[in-house]
Image: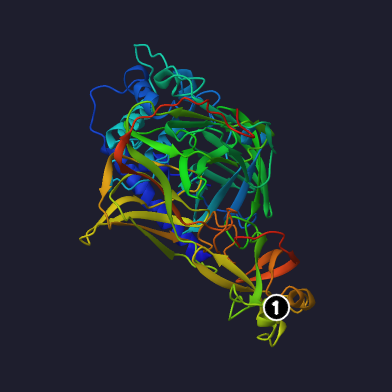
Amino acid sequence: MRISGALALGLSVGILVSGCSREAEPDPVGVWNLKFGASQASTGRIPTSLLRVEEVDGELEAQLTSIRDRFLPVDDLRVEGATMSFAYGAYEYDLEIDGDLMTGTVVSPRGTEPVSGRRQVETLMYNRPEEFRTSRGGVIGHRVELAPPDDEPDPAAWVLSRVQAPRDLAFIVFLRNHTTAVAFVNAEDFEEELRAHAGQRVEITAVWVGEELRLETIEAAETESEG
Amino acid sequence: MRKALIVGVASVALIGSWGTLVASGSPPQERAPTWTDDIAPLMAVNCMGCHRPGEVSPMSLLTYEDVVPWARSIRMVVSERIMPPWHADPRYGDFANERRLTEKEIGTLVDWVAAGAPRGSGTFTPPTFPTGWALDAELGPPDYIFELEEEFLVPAAGPDIIHHVMTSTTHKEDIWIRAIEARGNSRVVHHINVDAYWPDGTWDGLALAVPGRQPDLFPDGSAHRLPVGSQFRVEMHYHPNGEEQVDRTKVGVWLARTPIEYEIRGSLVTDQSFEIPPYEPNYESVAEREFDEEVELLLMTPHMHYRGKDMRFQAIHPDGREETLLFVPQYNMYWQIAYVLAKPTRLAKGSKLRVTSHFDNSENNPWNPNPSVRVIWGMDSRDEMMEGWIHYRRKLAEPVIPSYDAEITGGSGAR
């Protein structure tokens, strides 16, 4: 094992290159979402932080996100077997890696806090992209021709006359100076409800799936909605 | 993913190199800086306003004993310009509330830590901070106080909460607001917006309270008008912090008592038409506003959410000349900073204010809650906003001499 050469480089801020030879297993390389103990969170500190460990030219480097901010390099990175330690300003971390989990403590002038971490897989911030469930107001219209004009006497007929397949029924969102259509990935499953609300203002709950929505509930809007 | 990591390393390398230059760039000193002579006066101005008991900051930095254990962290965040939080590109603008340390000041702090954080032989008494209204000493108690009728419970965990309260006002004549201050539980209040809705539907942004920001005290002779029949809207944005907290935000309003030459308006330049594709790393959004009369710009506040990267405010003068007034190259959603111009910037009739911003909906954005979705405008922080908040003032045709005979009281929610 080798210890970080940060001080030798004379960097006052922190290190860029921390030298450690690494055991084949367990593997510290990756992005870890760290969560801190409640007492630390209660001081106002953002209760999560990202730790990024990389292998560059056979040596390990690590950076940690600072308070509500960007990645900064850690000092004194040491990895030995399943244990990893480093300093981050006045914080001293001691962690134990167990597969895709890590646990340990961080010691600071405020005391000792428990830390737990989970290895990220698909994105940096979350283990998986967070499911984004949304509630919105809009109109059931046509995915290309959008919504009927305000003075259309029969909005439902206006929409339905243009629909050739359930996927043509879309959620029309009115932004300040722009109108856009969002298709439903499960329009077939909700075809009856969508047809019943064609041309109407509705409130929906749905989950974003790529550029489309997976509809969960739909009901007529009680009042005018800004969309 | 590999590419993302390499990009990240490059960024860190640049930051680190810059930090090294800063650290080594301070001129050699005959003596090491000391707490009493050099550091405490510096931190009194730049740090202690937030880093004191009862404020949002996680540790007090009022005394030598408070500070020394955190010396290494202070060196790190100051060298990296994470603290004090100030994100304006120094090439543009001259701001009255600038919190940017000079390289000499950073060097002093770095040298002090390197020297073992010596105390020095003198004494330092921390400044006294007001416990009530910050403007009390200068203006006396507020003329008008809005306060939540009930405490609002902020849970220990969960997503951010946006809670807003509308209250009607009952004053019988137009009033003019010279200063406004919002106070909430700073442990969980991320920011407080105070807006006025006029009877004709006009919206006027009055104040934005954020941790560490001074209250809004408008320039002499300038005030917000609040017409008869207006409503106040107070919006609290809460950020759960790990334990239950209660908040009872209150807003103090001071009325103008001297002749008013300028009417202040709070407004925004916004694009709500953007549709950011999945995984798009640098989506550009542009909005413009043209002024049909001469105005003077007072302050600018960029507002975006998790995917916001940068925002630039430019004046497009009638002769076509473009002038950058503010550029925030590394936007951080957690700091809603108002950049107050040291001198109001004149915008002639026909001028435009252009706001340009970029969004990172890629996996390389560590704060991106979901890079796989299309992103459109929305209040949820996982949606996006592209708003340049501004305060500007317009000269009145005739100065207004305010006089207030009627009692000024609020309706529901106010007292």
Nearer to me, B366 or A111? B366
Question: Residue extending furthest left?
Answer: B319
Judge whether residue A13 can be spotted in this image. yes
Dividing the picture into quadrants, the one containing residue B409 is top right
Nearer to me, A223 or B269? A223
Q: Position of residue B12 (x, y in %)?
A: 42, 51
Up/down of B101 relative to B10, above or below: above
Question: Left or right: where does residue B126 sit relative to residue B368?
Answer: left
Colouring convention used in this rendered image of the protein: rainbow
Tell how many labels.
1
Q: Position of residue B291 (x, y in %)?
A: 33, 55
Judge whether residue B50 can be spotted in this image. no
Q: Residue shown at 35%/17% (left/top)?
A: B36
Nearer to me, B59 or B218? B218
Dividing the picture into quadrants, the one containing residue B54 is top right
- Placement of the C terminus of chain B among the 4 image quadrants: top right
Up/down of B316 relative to B92, above or below: below
Q: Residues within 10 Å of mark 1 (few under 14, many from 20)?
A: some
| Circle 1: element type | helix
Question: Left or right: where does residue B182 sit relative to residue B265?
Answer: right
Instruction: Report which residue position mark 1 lands on.
Output: A156
> Please, which chain is the residue tagged with disc 1 on?
A
Q: Residue shown at 60%/74% (left/top)?
A: A151
Question: Residue extending furthest top?
Answer: B122
Question: Left or right: where does residue B176 sit relative to residue A199?
Answer: left
Nearer to me, B399 or B300? B399
Residue type at mark 1 is: Ala
Q: Position of residue B122 (x, y in %)?
A: 34, 11
Q: Residue shown at 50%/26% (left/top)?
A: B406
